[in-house]
């Protein structure tokens, strides 16, 4: 017997067995079914905005496919990218739980499928499902620690080269699989990287050139090879 349409969406989006770390992976059948009844799937084109910094929280978005840029802007128009979402990530979680305005703006940067859960329904779901509520608390803690790491990278690094080395080291981790040498596709422009590490596009380009000169990275198109993550890590702590 086939699962209800809504439940199929939940299962395909957030309970994939190969993504154990995802927030709502392996919920009980009853909890997964309840989650499906309060979830609305939608497709968003490139350029769409899910929510805006300072906006009252409407709910959360669970990214099923595609990429969403989370950013904040200063009064003088400078943009800092906090991160690029991955499938399975729940966006707007801190605001939905606390009731405070969204702290970031979420812009779709490639066609994206996402499930929306209204804030009231989401909070009721958490009150009725202790396991899901505990996972949300753990996720909020991880978000806090990630923000601390970002502040250290941007505020305490001594140079753009060190910031870029840290950025590449962190982004290569999921591809390393325990190996020192890693090759992966870097899906960010120099401008986007600059907005993540607090540097201009020109500064990022120069930092890339310096890392290539030191032979700690190799770049061919969008493919980036790090011959030794250990060697790259040494540049972060020099």
Image: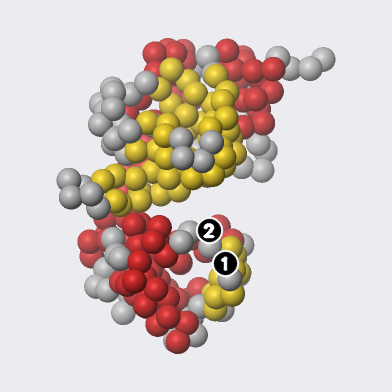
Disc 2 secondary structure class: loop
Taking depth in this image into account, of 167 and 229 the one nearest to the observer is 167
Quarter residue 157 falls in: bottom left
Q: Is residue 138 visible?
A: no
Q: Is residue 17 above or below residue 201?
A: above
Q: Residue at x 26, y 46 (%)?
A: 73
Disc 1 secondary structure class: loop
User: Left or right: 83 with respect to 11?
Assistant: left
Quarter residue 180 falls in: bottom right
Find disc 2 in the rendering and name its residue: 187
Find disc 1 in the rendering and name its residue: 222
Q: Is residue 212 visible?
A: yes
User: Left or right: 75 with respect to 141?
Assistant: left
Residue 34 image position (x, y, % from top left): 57, 13
Taking depth in this image into account, of 234 and 151 the one nearest to the observer is 151
Residue 133 image position (x, y, % from top left): 43, 24
Q: In the rendering, which numbered label is found on residue 48?
A: none
Q: CB atoms at circles 2 and 1 under 8 Å apart?
A: yes
Q: Is residue 196 above or below residue 30?
A: below
Q: Residue at x 41, y 49 (%)?
A: 83
Residue 121 image position (x, y, % from top left): 44, 13
Residue 159 image position (x, y, % from top left): 27, 74
């Amino acid at each position: 017997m086939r699962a209800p349409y809504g439940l199929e969406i939940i299962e395909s989006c957030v309970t994939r067995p190969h993504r154990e770390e995802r927030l709502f992976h392996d919920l009980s059948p009853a909890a997964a079914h309840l989650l499906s009844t309060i979830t609305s799937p939608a497709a968003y084109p490139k350029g769409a905005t899910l929510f805006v910094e300072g906006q009252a929280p409407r709910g959360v978005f669970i990214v099923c496919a595609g990429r969403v840029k989370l950013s904040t802007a200063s009064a003088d128009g400078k943009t800092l990218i906090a991160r690029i979402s991955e499938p399975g990530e729940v966006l707007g979680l801190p605001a939905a739980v606390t009731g405070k305005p969204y702290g970031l703006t979420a812009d779709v940067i490639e066609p994206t499928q996402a499930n929306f859960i209204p804030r009231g329904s989401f909070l009721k779901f958490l009150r009725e499902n202790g396991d899901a509520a505990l996972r949300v608390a753990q996720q909020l803690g991880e978000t806090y620690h990630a923000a601390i790491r970002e502040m250290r990278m941007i505020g305490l690094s001594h140079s753009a080269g060190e910031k870029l080395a840290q950025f590449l080291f962190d982004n290569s981790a999921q591809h390393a699989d325990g190996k020192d040498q890693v090759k992966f596709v870097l899906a960010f422009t120099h401008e986007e990287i600059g907005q993540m590490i607090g540097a201009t596009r020109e500064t990022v380009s120069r930092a890339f050139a310096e890392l290539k000169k030191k032979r700690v990275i190799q770049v061919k198109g969008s493919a980036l090879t790090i011959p030794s993550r250990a060697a790259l890590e040494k540049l972060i702590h020099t």
